[in-house]
Amino acid sequence: MRPVYIAGAGMTKFGRSEWSLIELASAASLAALHHANLGDHRVDGVVVANMGAARVNRQTALGSALVDQLALYPAAAESVENGPASGASAFKVGVQAIASGMADVVLVTGVERMRVVNGLEGTDFVASLSHPEAEYIYGVTLPALAGMFARLVMDRYGVERRHLAMVAIKNHENGTKNPYAHIQQTVTMEGILTAPEAVVNNPPIAEPLHLFDCCAVSDGAAAVVLVSGDVAQRLEHPSIRVAGIGQATDTHAVHEREDPTDLKAVRLASEGAFAMAGLRPENVNVAELHDAFTILEIAESEAAGFFPRGQGHEALERGETKLDGKLPINPSGGLKAKGHPVGATGVAQLVELTWQLRGEAGARQVEDAKVGYACNFGGFGNNVVATVLKREDG
Amino acid sequence: MAKADELEGLLRPPAMELPPYPPKVITLASGEQMVVRQIVRDEVSVLLEAIYPLLLVERDFYDIVSARLFGELLAYKRYRVKDEYVLVGVIDGVLAGMVNGRMVDGKTGMSYHTLTIRRGLRVGSHLFAAKMEYHIEYCKQQDVLIVAESPIGFRRWMIEYPLEKRFDVQHELGGVPSWVLRSETYYRAKPRLVTGRRPVAEDLLARAATIVLPEEEALVRQVAGEKEAES
Amino acid sequence: MSDHVYGAKCTSCGAVSYPAHAVCPECSGEVFDRVPIGGTGRVLTYTDVYALAIDYETRFLRLAIVELDDGTRATGQLLADEPKLGMRIETRIGVVREPGDRKILGLQFVPI
């Protein structure tokens, strides 16, 4: 396998957009291509990550559409759909193309434009990833699965609502330092939990999860440009190496999981990524986790290997995962504050890590970040892709 | 001038004696303090200025709500609507949202509109609840007739309180079959839907005394969404 | 309309899986007998869902994952006024979703 590098990264501001799906995708793509400054090198392939276009935007064959918009023909192109893990899966496909020697330059773009439908339609669409006979017919939605997971984890490990609130507060704070983040609003413990008004400010969504435990629905796009070692050498900027990628699946119906509190696929995917990279969780300086629900940031931080099982909330409470802590988690604001255009998220995590490792993260820069880790959580944890990126100096 | 005054008297609706709405303060998710208070007629011009840029924003039914609210506020200011009230939410003096309605009689209220300017902090939920609080707890009414222009927002209230169908009654807002919030239901829902602290501290009240408008560009952008995606 | 919800019993190793799979997760067998899922058990976890899916007009929906006494697990609607982790339940079949004018039957859990 040849080594693969990220040469450039770009994204649109996440939020509500008037732009079309392809306009969003091409804006992020152009930003990444300019950042990569490829000179004469041609793009061999384009991989688009997206979950909902066929249903929500009534558009298919996005890979071909984006190639056309960017006049990149005759480059190879396709779309990848893996639910909320579409982004990292598309990234994996791009990496494999270069690692195998089949391509030298691949553009990977994730995009989602969900706000063309109302909240009910949007919820139903995302719920379509649940098991049709064993879950969906009961009115199961992604928040419902997260709520059941949260209750069990909180009961077993002593995680409390105030820990969930800490995740929200931290990520909202980080979001205000990220000009691309959807939500630019800080929240306080008083406002979302302890004040009597919190019952209206932060109503239940799927108990014990409340409004501020759930990420926003956003439109947006994010893109990275992947290159081979030869191309990377000829470009004049820091090389961010794709050190490791791991992927693992688990049962579809959540009730069939061996241990419904165990994010087994996160653990296996992370072990795979670290093994390939020849690194360990302790080597990671900055992480982007998939906090579609605040409880998931805590649970993933354990399953990925950063904290012992059942102790993630204690590390959070000690401030270890804040921007100035030992292991900053979600400096971008996470899905919670940055937003979650489903297909774009996995790629956006890698965009943030690329900027962090290149020292380009502005007000939210993690000092001397050399190794980054991302976890893209598909389904409700039944399809996870984990990535390790490393800055190679000199 | 007696003749003109007489005419004016004919054109004005009779007015009930209504208790004033006692101001309250609400801690929002951001930790900011929002003062909810009633306005006086002189303050209508400021509110009209805030609404004006929203008149053509189609997203989320802002255009029709703004247009109707504009008319209702003018009518209130110029004494052409019976027993209308307007409540506003202000954060550090800056307008965050407004609600209005009127009294049909001692027993029945007619809810008009809810307009949120500062989004993402449940301002609309707080102000709608304050409206209901005014009708039922302070004006001692039994029923409040309600409809809405936006289906998704309304579904939330319909299910949350819950509201009941009173379809034999045509609501003033376009003759749409009306829903109703009954006083019993209000009291049962109150612990989870109505919050706020009274009395409001002197200095907070003083800061809320003059309504300041949010910057127009920021207002439209927040309400209407981004015109462009940056990259 | 069926009175039961069915899982699959592997004819090679006897393991019951619900939902059914094409290949037995235990022994990789590919031949199954249809078996009804139900009986008594306990609540493993539950949630009250307020952000409802399409087709639902209640204020919230109470859902649970249960572990039945025979070891199988299932997801369904919990019809308990005071839910508790570990509470004993029994299953029954009822209308769990009404898309348009259809009535979909599924598992409901009632306290015992």
Image (cartoon, grey):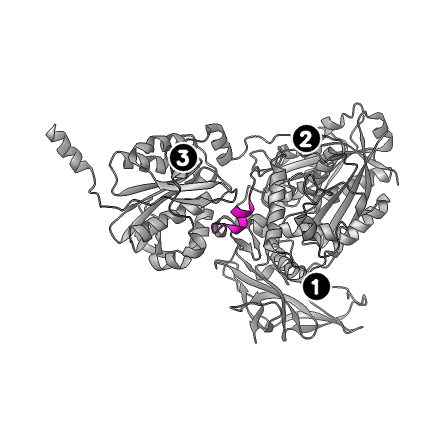
Left or right: B113 with respect to B221?
left
**Mark 3 surroundings within 10 Å by alpha-carbon count, few (fewer than 14), some (14 through 19), many (20 or more):** some
Provide the chain ID for the residue under circle 2: A
Q: Give left or right: position of B195 versus A107.
A: left
Contact? badges 1 and 3 (CB < 8 Å)? no
Vertical position of residue A71 compared to residue C2: above or below: above
Which amino acid type corresponds to the residue marked 3 in the rendered image? Arg
In three-dimensional space, the C-alpha distance between marks 2 and 3, rounded to whole angstroms, equals 36 Å
Secondary-structure class at tag 1: helix
Q: Quadrant of residue B192?
A: bottom left
Q: Which residue is mark 1?
A: A256
What's under tag 2, amino acid-wise? Answer: Gly
Q: Nearer the viewer, mark 1 or mark 3?
A: 3
What residue range appears in magenta? A187-197
- Which of the two discs, 2 and 3, sits closer to the camera? 3
In this orientation, which residue lies closer to the viewer: B16 or A123?
B16
Q: Is residue C26 left or right of residue B228?
A: right
The image quadrant where one finds the N terminus of chain A is: top right
* Label of residue A362 in the image: 2
The residue type indicated by label 1 comes to: Glu
Q: What is the residue that sits farthest to the right in this orientation?
A: A1
| Chain to which mark 1 belongs | A
Category of crowding for the residue at label 2, using alpha-carbon neighbours closer than 10 angstroms: few (below 14), some (14–19), many (at least 20): few
Residue C25's x, y, as percent? 77, 65
Which numbered marker is on residue B207?
Answer: 3
**Residue at point 34%, 57% (across, down):** B182
